Amino acid sequence: MVALAALTISPSALLDRIAGLRSRPFVFALVVVGLYLGRPLVAWPMSLCSAVVGYGYGLVGTPFALAGVLLTCLPPYVLGRYAGDASALGRIGHAGERFFARTGGARGVAAARLAPLPADPVSVGAGLSGVGLRRYLLGTLVGEVPWTVAAVFAGSSLSTLAVAGLESASVELGLAAGAIAVLALAGPAYEYLRDRRAHQNVSEQS
């Protein structure tokens, strides 16, 4: 269903209609909320929605965009949370549980958000892994701040709203955010390797 919607619904046509509502801030806000709610169904990037906010409200719309990010990340998370072991993704959920047990829910989600990964698989994975809602939202907020600010800034600089103009994040931003994600996971990774080495030494001695 998601694949069909992504192929049949044109972002360009939708953005053309949204652009016409720029002079009507309240109606524009309602349409943007609908865009955030429907985004998971068409698998569009969150940066597109944030750039639309920037186009309509400028940089002052950043808090609105961050709230929209939290809103649009909830449906995939809830899907993963209630899929549970009955789904074919049960193994991924168990692997995720071990990952978040090492990193902590909020830090693990924040690191995944900072890394240039698709948003919805991260959301579903966090839900499958049993990350609590508060920690999930906190990690999402922290990890999405640089991407959202960059997208809003890109949208605010556009004179015409078009998909071609929504290159919201540069390569430099991606590298920087990825480096922060690696640093955030450095401590848990070191502890994991240390515990694994200690376990191997005990096994060899026995």
Image: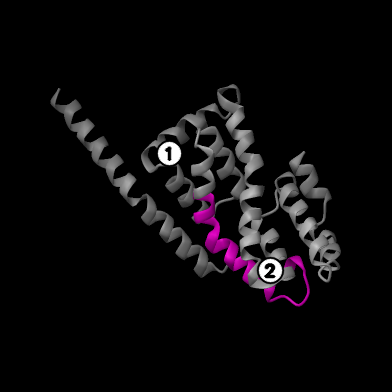
Residue 183, percent from left and from top: 36, 56
Q: Nearer the viewer, residue 132 or 201?
A: 132
Return the residue nearer the eye: 192 or 17.
17
Q: Residue at x 50, y 49 (%)?
A: 138
Q: Amino acid at mark 2?
A: Gly
Residue 34 lies, in percent from the top left, at 77, 51
Q: Is residue 155 magenta?
A: yes
- Which stretch did the figure color magenta? 139-167
Q: Determine if residue 115 is in view.
A: no
Between the C-alphas of marks 2 and 1, the distance is 33 Å
Q: Earlier in the sequence, mark 2 or mark 1?
A: 2
Residue indicated by mark 2: 54
Residue shown at 41%/34% (left/top)?
Answer: 98
Q: Disc number at residue 100? A: 1
Q: Main secondary structure of the magenta part?
A: helix
Q: Give the residue type that dot 1 points to.
A: Phe
Q: How is the image coloured?
A: one colour
The question of residue 178 being in magenta is answered with no
Tell me what residue is drawn at x 38 percent, y 43 percent.
103
Residue neighbourhood size for the residue with mark 1, other residues' Cα within 10 Å, grouped as few (<14), some (14–19), many (≥20): some
Q: Is 97 left or right of 203, judged from the image as shown? A: right
Q: Position of residue 41 (x, y in %)?
A: 74, 44
Label 1: state its secondary structure: helix
Compared with 170, 95 (above or below) is above
Left or right of residue 185, residue 25 in this image: right
